[in-house]
Amino acid sequence: MIPVGYMAKRVKRRPDWLQAPQVVDIYSVSNCQSENFADYIPFWKHNGYWFFDSPEIIKNVAEENSISLEGTSLFYYEEYEMEFDGECWHPWSPEASFPTNVVLPSKKKIEGFDVANFTARTSPECSGLSCSSLAGDLGTNEHCLFASFSEAETNVSNGAFNGSEPGPYRIFSVYSIDWQ
């Protein structure tokens, strides 16, 4: 797993339409259910993985642009080095034109593993577990995430995400971080 960075998100409770009673809230890496703190890409402060290198950069972006971080949760992500095109696993790489220097967190809590699609090859688009309601069929934890990397990799390799959202698909480890 590659350290890819941080994101502040507004975590949402499970929507009524998501038929997965074990899910309490959505910790997805995508912006579809639990939204990012802002439409951050136009600020051009993200790294080559389309996340932020440190929590301080998020705080600076919010302050410089009068964006409230009240009510947000901070997440740190690592990403599997391979992506699945629906048939095979292939290596991928970050956008080289953006400087990337992820500061590793001193303390992190693993929450689970998410799978997101990347048709545009930039930021995560949809998390099939929540966006496409796969959590009801595949089983997840209370945060709508797989409990292990093995579960995520097996489900992706077996084609469970094919047909939900267009690929390729990438696997993320999702960690919660305390705001300082």
Image (spheres, rainbow, N blue to C red):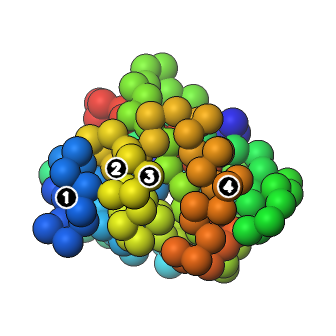
Name the kind of residue labelled 4 in the image: Asn
Residue position marked by numbered label 4 in the rendering? 158
Residue position marked by numbered label 2 in the rendering? 144
The disc at residue 14 is 1
Which of the image's four quarters has the C terminus? Answer: top left
**Along the polypeptide, which appears first: circle 2 or circle 3?**
3
Please give the name of the residue rendered at 30% of the width and 45% of the height, measured from the top-left corner. 143
Name the kind of residue labelled 1 in the image: Arg
Callout 2 secondary element = loop
Callout 3 secondary element = helix
Q: CA distance from mark 4 to mark 2?
A: 19 Å
Tags 1 and 2 in contact by the CB under 8 Å rule? yes
Query: Which quadrant would residue 48 be assigned to in this image?
Result: bottom right
Name the kind of residue labelled 2 in the image: Cys
**Along the polypeptide, which appears first: circle 3 or circle 1?**
1
Q: CA distance from mark 1 to mark 2?
A: 9 Å
Residue position marked by numbered label 3 in the rendering? 138
Please give the name of the residue rendered at 65% of the width and 62% of the height, measured from the top-left corner. 159
- Which mark's residue is nearer the viewer, 2 or 3? 3
- Which mark's residue is nearer the viewer, 3 or 1? 3
Callout 4 secondary element = loop
